[in-house]
Amino acid sequence: MRKITLLLLLGASFMTRAQSDFQKTDENYGGTIFTVQNIIFTINYSRTVNDIIIFGKYDFVDSELAVRSCCEDGKTKKDNVKVLARLFHFSVELGSDLILAEIKAAGYRPATLLELLTFDEVVGIPPQSSHEVVALGSLIKCSNNHFGVPFINNNYLGRSLDLAWYNGDWETSYYFLAIKNKMF
């Protein structure tokens, strides 16, 4: 059985408007899982990913993402939906499956590409931030037959919307956007 410790986490460099609620120490991983909570924003599910990408004025967009539509998961389009989101951060390198298990155990689901883009549009990641924000809910089969997931960061190319390899371990600079299963 894992031992969980709750502690207040403050001052995430790119989440100045969000409040933090807990830090969870997990003996199985030998690390800490940080989450930032109370990120409430509205998503218009009828918008296309391409429209949001153009509006976002990214300096670099992975070519595999530039051709995607917003409904890659086949869900029904809805207009404005209010969501409760949370960023998960891990102090040790973990694989995608373990991260997804932690997100689901907390009552969340991984964010999709459309939700990630809307998050960046509404909340934003400041240019000076060295953090990457990932949407594990959009698993994309790339032209090289590998699977990738979208993430947003600031790097030597500027503000980037890129794909990261789904398999393997995630470095500690990554944050994982998740959406609450039931808002209220």
Image: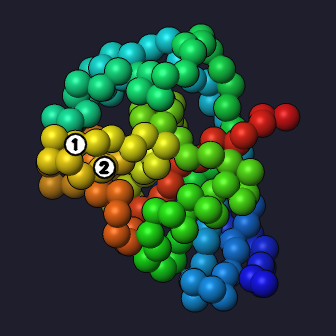
| The C terminus: image quadrant | top right
Amino acid identity at mark 2: Gly
Look at the picture and state if 66 lies above or below 145: above
Asked which quadrant contains residue 160, the reply is: top left
- For residue 148, which numbered disc appears in the image? 2
Secondary element at image label 2: strand
Residue 115 placement (x, y as % from top left): 50, 33
Please name the residue shown 77% across and 79% down the image: 4
Please name the residue shown 76% across and 74% down the image: 7
Residue 54 placement (x, y as % from top left): 27, 21
| The N terminus: image quadrant | bottom right
Look at the picture and state if 86 lies above or below 65: below
Amino acid identity at mark 1: Cys
Q: Answer whether residue 179 is visible to the viewer in this image.
A: yes
Name the residue carrying label 1: 142
- Pick out the residue farthest to the front: 145
Please name the residue shown 41% across and 22% down the image: 70
Look at the picture and state if 109 lies above or below 1: above
Identify which residue, 3 or 129, lies in the foreground: 3
